[in-house]
Amino acid sequence: MPVAAAPHIVSPPLTPHSPALGERLLVALSEEEFHAFFGETSIVDSWNSTLPCKCASWTNRTDWEHTLREFRPTVLLSCWSTPRLPESFANAADSPLRYVCHVTGSIRGLVPRGFLERGGLVTNWGAMAAPQVAEHALLLALATLRNQPQWRPFVQQNRLQTTWHPIPDLQTKSLFGKRVGLHGFGQIARSLVRLLKAFDVEIYAYSNGVPPGLMESCGVTPCESLGQLFARSEVLFECEALTPQSTNSVNESILAALTTGAVFVNVGRGRVVEEKALWHEAQSGRIRIALDVMVEEPVSGHSILWSLPNAIISPHIGGPTFDRFPQCGRQALNNMIRYFRKEPLESIVSTEIYDRST
């Protein structure tokens, strides 16, 4: 079933000042994705007089590779459904493809690293996602503190009683005045800092390689180690980038440092956390957890974390909300205009950003 259009429609794209000689644009989004991000905008109709454009369609891998070979795009507009680029096409020194304008987030599943290494350009929605991810992290923390998973069971068990006291029985908690830890100090963490200050909290942070002075400039107390951060935190937000050093860094001993009754929220990357150790801490009732990311996505019923009745698990929806999609589409269009006009691009994906993504 087609996805409904986002409430705000992107205005028609501008065209380059002059014909982009030699450029060929391949638009490789599903119909639903295109409508959600660009509304009724017709990129092909608007730009066909300026450069050759084509809307890709594919039913299998062979169709996709045939389209790339035959059309030989120099620019690709991509989204979640776009098939992965073959290394033989993306990485080759004589490949015509020079720029991938990705409308959404991570491009690891789409673009081989060799494309960047040979000088190819990639952009995505960049920092646009951070405020909404921080907003979702705050939602998960507040819902967990208020013990949201037990609301419906409590109402069902007590609906016939004339007097009841849900607050003591549910062991609800407030965020106000808590000691809050941030593992990671990128765009999401810094957006969280701005949201958290309204709750009069003490904020601590640790992120390998981040200068303590940057944290202090944001009113955050840096910690000397990950263990120290967890030991100080009553609410811990996991938002560290995934690197070889951070993979499984939140292990059994680190989780054990959390105070009893602490809340653990992961909006970063699932593989930063040892899930068996997290399950052990949560199933015992010692800590409460809320997860927007997991090692296996989409999560299956076989996940040990899925079986936890008191865990809050959201389906990796922390990024820009549906009503923000047109803004993401507008940024992608503006980036393509900049590219054709040979102007600097926004939200470029470097090899370092590529390696930190999943």
Image (cartoon, rainbow, N blue to C red):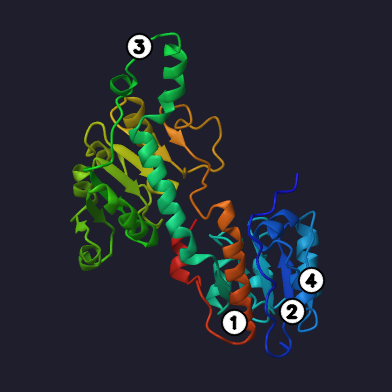
Secondary structure found at label 4: strand
Distance from the alpha carbon under mark 1 to that under mark 2: 15 Å
Q: Marks 2 and 4: CB-CB under 8 Å?
A: yes
Residue 54: mark in rendering: 4
Distance from the alpha carbon under mark 1 to that under mark 3: 65 Å
**Image height check: is 150 above or below 29?**
above
Q: Which residue is mark 3?
A: 163
**Image height check: is 348 above or below 205?**
below
User: Residue shown at 46%/30% (left/top)?
Assistant: 304
Mark closest to the chain's N terminus, 4 or 1: 4
Residue 24: mark in rendering: 2
Q: Mark 3: few, some, or many residues within 10 Å (few <14, many ≥20)? A: few
Distance from the alpha carbon under mark 4 to that under mark 1: 20 Å
Secondary structure found at label 3: loop
Distance from the alpha carbon under mark 3 to that under mark 2: 70 Å
Secondary structure found at label 2: loop
